[in-house]
Image: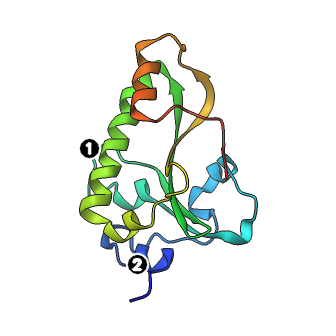
Amino acid sequence: MPALTFKQAVEATPEIAMGFRTGLSAFGKHSNKVEVADTSLIQGSVEIDECTKYLYPNDNRWDYTFAYNSEVYFVEVHSANSGEVRAVILKFQWLKQWLNEKAPEINKMKSKSRTPYYWVQSKNFQIPKNSPQYRTAIKAGLVPIPKLVL
């Protein structure tokens, strides 16, 4: 059986089946937070948070996913300050559980050539490098970056 396209994997995931958007359009005003070498290789995007907010109203939900060059990436655009580290880690834990339980086809497609998970800072970086929060972010593999460049 041939591998699914990103669009087919999204459509096979009931909770986000209607959320597929072309290019990075699901990112809306945050589409400038991702830069790719060849835009023709973007195979679509989904705003996971918007699609799942009614199903998980009290959870810390992850923001976005998109496919580039047949690999799927997950992006959280969020404030990068010490007080937000815990919230982003809770979102990350939610995403991993959600992928395993509700989105197995998308989970199979996550990037293997580089980390598939990114915390992209919405504004300035304000987590002191010697703080426990910074160490916590590093341990989780989620140090905020200004922009995801692929």
Q: What residue type is labelled 2?
A: Glu
Q: In this view, does 139 lie to the left or right of 146?
A: left
Tell me which label, 1 or 2, sits earlier in the chain: 2
Q: How crowded is mark 1: few (under 14 residues within 10 Å), some or many (20 or more)?
A: few
Q: What residue is disc 2 on?
A: 11
What residue would you read off at disc 1? 58
Q: Residues within 10 Å of mark 2 (few under 14, many from 20)?
A: some
Q: Looking at the picture, how far across and down is residue 148, in whole percent?
A: 64, 46
Q: How many marks?
A: 2
Residue at image position (28%, 49%) is 57
Q: In which quarter of the image is residue 108?
A: bottom left
At a point 49% along the width and 54% down the height, the residue shown is 64
Which disc, if any, is residue 135?
Answer: none
Q: Which of marks 1 and 2 is in front?
A: 2
- Which secondary structure, mark 1? loop
Side of 83 relative to 75 (left or right): left
Between the residue at mark 1 and the residue at mark 2, the CA separation in whole angstroms equals 25 Å
Tell me which residue sits at (72%, 72%) in the image: 40
